[in-house]
Amino acid sequence: MVGAGEDRFGHPHTLGFSTLLFKVGTSDAGGNLFVIEHRNLMAGGGPALHRHWSQDEWFYVMGGEVAFEVGERKVTLHAGESVLGPRQIPHTFGAVGATPAHMLIAFSPAGKMEAYLQDAAHPHPGVSDAEFFRRYEMDYLGPSPFWKS
């Protein structure tokens, strides 16, 4: 049981553009699933364009508006809508509404995503973004088109 507004491990995580709450840890489901709650995603924030080598990533918007680029497709989702980012397909997202966005994100299998989200919260001097992503079985493909310049 993980309560509302709580993290599975007792403390929130961040990548600087939102708050992440781990809801299902990698070890909870034998490596088959990792689930996070993405809170307070502000416009202009979100991950770089990337692709996962082995994980499918499912996004469910709980509040706000979130623009997604999945392969060649671009969509804007609202509360109650979802989209799948299949493994090997480039994708990114960013909040685009006037209010912060709120999502659930699931990775299957979990792979190294829990470790990535923990490690990405800290600086990695002397390591390129591409090299850092490769450590976690992803490819860095460039900046997100949703980032504010």
Image (spheres, rainbow, N blue to C red):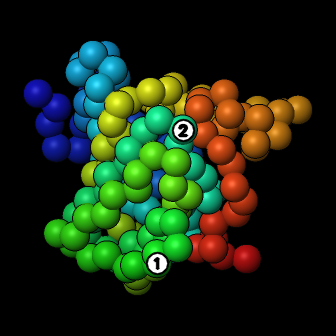
**Residue 107's image quarter?**
top left
**Can you identify the residue that label 2 sits on?**
53
Is 67 rendered above or below residue 28? below
Residue shown at 69% from the left, 55% from the top:
141
Q: Is residue 39 visible?
A: no
Q: Is residue 99 above or below residue 26?
A: below
Residue type at mark 2: give it.
Answer: Trp
Q: Which residue is mark 1?
A: 74
Q: Secondary structure at mark 2?
A: loop
Left or right: where 78 falls relative to 42: left
Category of crowding for the residue at label 1, using alpha-carbon neighbours closer than 10 angstroms: few (below 14), some (14–19), many (at least 20): few
Which of labels 1 and 2 is toward the front? 2
Q: Nearer the viewer, residue 53 or 110?
A: 53
Q: In the image, what residue occupies the spot 16% across and 43% down?
A: 4
Q: Nearer the viewer, residue 25 or 108?
A: 108
Q: Which residue is at a point 46% across and 75% down the rendered structure image?
A: 73
Q: Earlier in the sequence, mark 1 or mark 2?
A: 2
**Residue occupying the point 53% across, 43% down:** 52
> How far across and how far down the image is residue 34, in percent?
32, 33
Residue 146, picture quadrant: bottom right
Residue closest to the far bottom: 98
